[in-house]
Image (tube, rainbow, N blue to C red):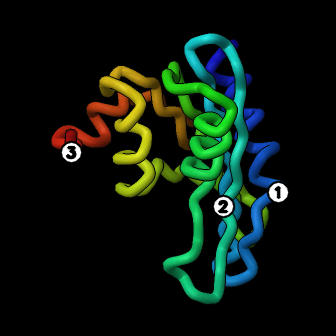
Amino acid sequence: MTDDQLYALALEAAQNAYAPYSGFRVGAALLSTDGRLFFGANVENASYGATICAERSALVQAVFSGARQFEAIAVAAVNADGEAVGAPPCGICRQALLEFNDGSMRVLFGTAQALQCVPLSELLPYGFR
């Protein structure tokens, strides 16, 4: 699967987001090392701490399905105007992904026109182990 294809799937996943407070819809497509795909979207809550990000939403689904090793994750964000915008995973999501990776996982974010690919270790150089 190409990076562009994975990003397109994340963009589709963003359509399932529940974002009534921020209007910022995020989707994630997580690729396991055995080739399975898992999807997530952000789900906001009036109690902001109860909100879950798209990346962790996909990760929870993957772990529930038995996946423990991941090759790449694509994150696609759409603002309230419906425009795709670049948004890397937040710190909590970076740390959650590191739990199941040595830092070599590819993290894709940006827009279809300006897609960035960065190793997780570069986004979280001092992750907690």
Please name the residue that numbered disc 2 is placed on.
Answer: 42
Type of residue at label 3? Answer: Phe
Question: Residue 97, how many percent across, how many down?
Answer: 43, 39
Q: Nearer the viewer, mark 3 or mark 2?
A: 3
Q: Is residue 112 visible?
A: no
Q: Which mark is residue 35?
A: none
Q: Is residue 53 visible?
A: yes
Q: Is residue 121 above or below residue 78?
A: above
Is residue 118 found left or right of 69 in the rendered image? Answer: left
Asked whether the beta carbons under mark 3 and mark 1 sit within 8 Å of each other, the answer is: no
* Location of residue 72 in the rendering, given as x and y in whole percent from the top left corner: 53, 25
Count of numbered marks: 3
Disc number for residue 16: 1
Q: Which residue is mark 3?
A: 128
Whichever of labels 3 and 1 marks the residue nearer the N terminus, that label is 1
Q: Residue visible at 67% across and 13% down? A: 35
Q: In the picture, which quadrant includes the N terminus?
A: top right
Query: Looking at the image, which residue is at 68% across and 24% down?
Result: 4
Which residue is painted at 63% across and 35% down in the image?
Answer: 62
Q: Quadrant of residue 47?
A: bottom right
Quarter occupied by the C terminus:
top left
